[in-house]
Amino acid sequence: ALSWSPANEVLSAGSQRFATMVDELTGGRLKIEVFAAGELVPPFGVFDACSQGTIEAFNSSAVYWAAKDPATQWFAGVPFGLNAQGIQTWYHAGDGLRLWEETYAPFGLVPRRGGSTGVQMGGWFRKKIDRLADLKGLKLRMPGLGGRVLAKAGATPMLLPLSQALQALEQGTIDGAEFVGPHDDLTAGFYRGARYYYYPGWHDAGGGMEFTFNRKAYESLPVDLRRALDYTALAVGGVILAEYEAKNALALRRLRTEFKARVEVLPFPAEVMKALKKLAAEVLREESEKSPMARKVYASYTKFQELLQDWGRISEGAYHNLVAG
């Protein structure tokens, strides 16, 4: 079961691709039936349904499971945190995957990374954001750790499915909304409810998705079928990231040309970014103290990010500046 409707084209197609690849790799021995959000369980009900054995697997994002254990949030997107490449490195060359498995173990679940949206956009706003104080009192659709940072800035974060967020934005019952990036946002029609489209996506540079399995169902499979699930998740995840990179670039071009009379694509002011980064550090420390698992995950993630930063500055960062310059 998915947390996405068919309107979330890339993610929904990714789940279908996952099912098809598993069928092909296993010679038809393992078949997966895919259900869109709401067909079997509500979008945010997939975690419990899989934990209870009502479904055997789900495709979603750990950004929604903070109430289960605050540690889950580090496996989605972390404000001012690792990008998609960095998270993948933490998972497979650091402790990330092991810690994720440990976090989900009490719920009878086995998680696997299911791709990334890449660096997201900062969201759609009905009014301009010129200073941190402009966020105070705003109702904004943003889940996870990013939402908690906004709360510290005086905003009210909202957790809404895509369809409800769009309707609320159009009706003015919320003041802004963040979903993913230009492709999904343009397809959904967020420009109908707000004019100002801000970047960068400070709240989520990694955009982590998951293919997660009921442990009993997963462990009942022979080793070769389990590995088919594991490696298909990796392969499909790579395709999802590639599709987002290409489709977001095309959609951004459309927003700046076809929709330029209705949309302003703007950078957040440096003052706002500096203030949010400081608040984010406070939020991460506070959230890390809410469970023993959160403390372990926070320590590992933070240490690994610090390790990668030095290399990143003189590799990816330096090369990007060279090419862009």
Image (tube, grey):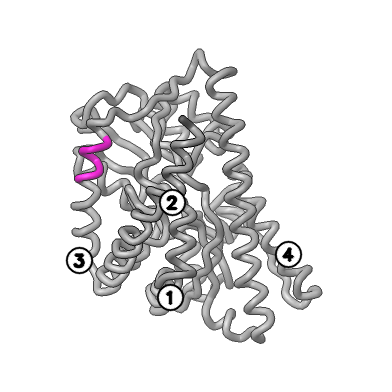
Which quadrant of the view contains residue 57?
bottom right
Mark 3 / mark 1, whichever is N-terminal: 1
Q: Quadrant of the N terminus?
A: bottom right
The residue identified by callout 3 is 289
Mark 2 / mark 4, whichever is N-terminal: 4
The residue identified by callout 4 is 21
User: Would you call the spot at circle 1 few (<14 residues within 10 Å), some (14-19), or many (20 or more)?
Assistant: few
Measuring from the top left, give residue 53's x and y in whole percent. 53, 76
The residue identified by callout 1 is 98
Which range of residues does the magenta coloring cover? 273-278
Query: Residue drawn 64% across and 62% down?
Result: 235
Query: Residue drawn 34% across and 61% down?
Result: 307
In depth, the one of 154 and 274 nearer the eye is 274
Three-letter amino acid code at the position of disc 2: Asn
Direction from residue 266 to residue 295 in the image, left or right: left
Measuring from the top left, give residue 11's x and y in whole percent. 59, 50
Q: Is residue 60 above or below residue 171?
A: below
Of badges 3 and 2, the one in the foreground is: 2
Q: Secondary structure at mark 2?
A: loop
Three-letter amino acid code at the position of disc 4: Met
